[in-house]
Amino acid sequence: MPADRPPFEDIYREFLGRIYAYVRAQVTSSADAEDITAQVFMNAYQAYPRFETRNTTPAAWLFRIARNATLDHFRAHSRRERLQRTVEHQPMDEHDPAGMAEERIRYQALLSHVARLPERQRDAISLRHSGLSFEEVGVLMKCSEDAAKMLYHRALKVLRESVREEMA
Amino acid sequence: MSDEEDLETKALQRQLDDAFQTTRPRRGFEDELWSKIQARRPWWHTAGAFFAAIVGGVRRVPPAPAAAVALLLVLVLGIGLLGSLGHRGGAGGAATSLSQGVQRGGQYNPVAGDFGRLPAPFLLAGSGVNDAVPPKEVSIAPRQTGANTLYFGPANLVWAGQLNVAVSTAPVYRFQAPSTDDANNFATSIGAAAQPGQADLSILGSYSSPDFTLTVAYGTRVPNREPFYFLTPTANGSAPGSTAPDIAGAYLSTHRLTPIWPSSVVVDQSGSRVQLLRQFEVAGVGPVFLVDGVGDRYGLDVHVNGNDVVQVAGPMPLSAPSAGYRIISAGQAVQSALASPPSGVDRITPTPTVMLTSAELVYALVWAGDHSFYEPAYLFSGTFSYNGTTYTKRVLVPAVDPSQLSS
């Protein structure tokens, strides 16, 4: 293993939570998020021997894989099916206070607003708040850094309105 | 954009940061997935199983090795090294407020409560650094820790032990969440420099030296852990010594990572994982262990393979001033323990009756946003059997007087 490349497990342990959070903000259920996250790291594991730290950061590399896996997921599931899943999504049992607390901790409500944004806006918000720079977001979304910033701020405005409406 | 809208946007951004930082997979997912990934390894990779087992054994413990292992180390190294960035490095480390208060016999204001009302410590199943692989497809959610299976669900509790605590006050420690500059200073103090081109905002910093790489990460609320670092030797990982603790100690000393806080050194059964379990000195009581979110003791971890250190993980050194708080009596602690609600969602039916047979004063980390506390607490423990398996039930009761708690 090249000296500049850490063991895959280090990468895995360091980024699993962030990748999961990114994916979770895109999909309607934690089960889907787990499936996609698992696929991301399976793919990453297979591709790791070819990963070059000179060309990209582990974060940018992994988020690219995550983004592709999420897009694949959406392609594989029709809009109708996704809506159906959303409708069927059961809220946490009210008699499960610990679970409810966890749910609150995870800011599910806010992330559900993010999940309802148009695809590119959702992506910009998710990537940015997963810790990527605007430059990295731009590279992943195939646009300039400035365009990524604009997209992000536009998404933020839409999200703010969405949250406002619910609170009103 | 109006000022109000600007403020609203900033608040939303902050919430998003928190949401993405705290959204994590369910307990056990990380290790389950890692097992699947490992199962896909080509057979020739298993030749390295010995090494992997060494590191894996260490890392299995933490839900995130970086997080878990690092957490342990951080704690050890932590509070002393950076210390208000008065890090002196080495065994002599910074004489931080923490060390002054704790190690020198508790020279703290006995009842001041200078930090105001405190958030209460609690056990949260799955939040500890010592997460292990949970059994699959079980109707309850036990957690394995060493030889024990932990149970956090409902139970009928009976006290059958003895608890004597002869003091009425104990110090509480508070530390601020570190900045990138703090992390940089820490890295510099041990001879590491920032890695160029780093753009990973989820960590405080990534560094390297000719001998090792270093990552310093933020503390998190879930799982509950301090800002931590983990250091991986890339060369010259060897250190003199005939035993794993000797080798670990020599490496820490050479790299100016020896923690200044009191600790008790333990070695796991494999002999490859050396833990410096962190302690806090409480006047009138003696050294008190720090426990994680499941009640396991932790501190700084050093993983050794032969004469080589393969990883060091522990708390980032931070200044932690102390303040004295009144604590409840042993009797009050017992009453609180027996009335405690379950801390986890596991459930065994019928509800088991558990004899709590031991209790001790401990310290627990309590996350409070841009700062955190180390607070005294009473940890009760007892075992029971169910379907041929012995479970351990733990209950954590805040030791700080309820009048000084915010929740």
Image (cartoon, coloured by chain):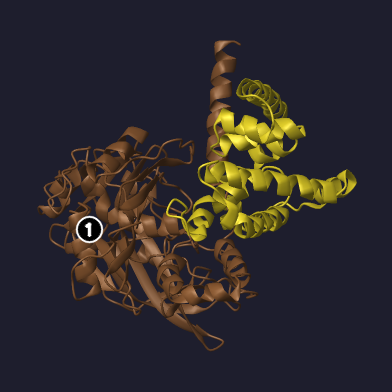
Per the rendering, the colour in which chain A appears is: yellow
Judging by colour alone, the chain drawn in brown in this rendered image is B
Q: Quadrant of residue B166?
A: bottom left
**Residue farthest bottom in this picture:** B388
Along the line of sight, which residue is nearer the eye, A93 or B305?
B305
Mark 1, residues whose alpha carbon is within 10 Å: few (<14), some, or many (≥20)? many
Question: Relative to residue A100, is residue A75 drawn left or right?
Answer: right
Task: Classify A62 as above or below B285.
Answer: above
Question: Relative to residue A149, is residue B251 drawn left or right?
Answer: left
Picture coordinates of residue B49 (x, y %)? 48, 75
Picture coordinates of residue A106 (x, y %)? 58, 46
Q: Is residue A165 visible?
A: yes
Amino acid tagged 1 = Leu
Along the line of sight, which residue is nearer the eye, B126 or B231?
B231
Question: Relative to residue A104, is residue B194 drawn left or right?
Answer: left
Q: How many numbered marks appear?
A: 1
Q: Is residue B168 visible?
A: no
Q: Residue at x 57, y 65 (%)?
A: B34
Q: To which residue does mark 1 refer?
A: B252
Q: Residue at x 71, y 24 (%)?
A: A158
Quarter in which the N terminus of chain B is drawn: top right
Picture coordinates of residue B385 (x, y %)? 49, 85
Along the line of sight, which residue is nearer the eye, B146 or B272?
B272
Picture coordinates of residue B238 (x, y %)? 26, 65
Task: Classify A137 as above or below B232.
Answer: above
Q: Residue at x 41, y 66 (%)?
A: B395
Chain where mark 1 sits: B
**Residue farthest top in this picture:** B2
Label 1: element kind: helix
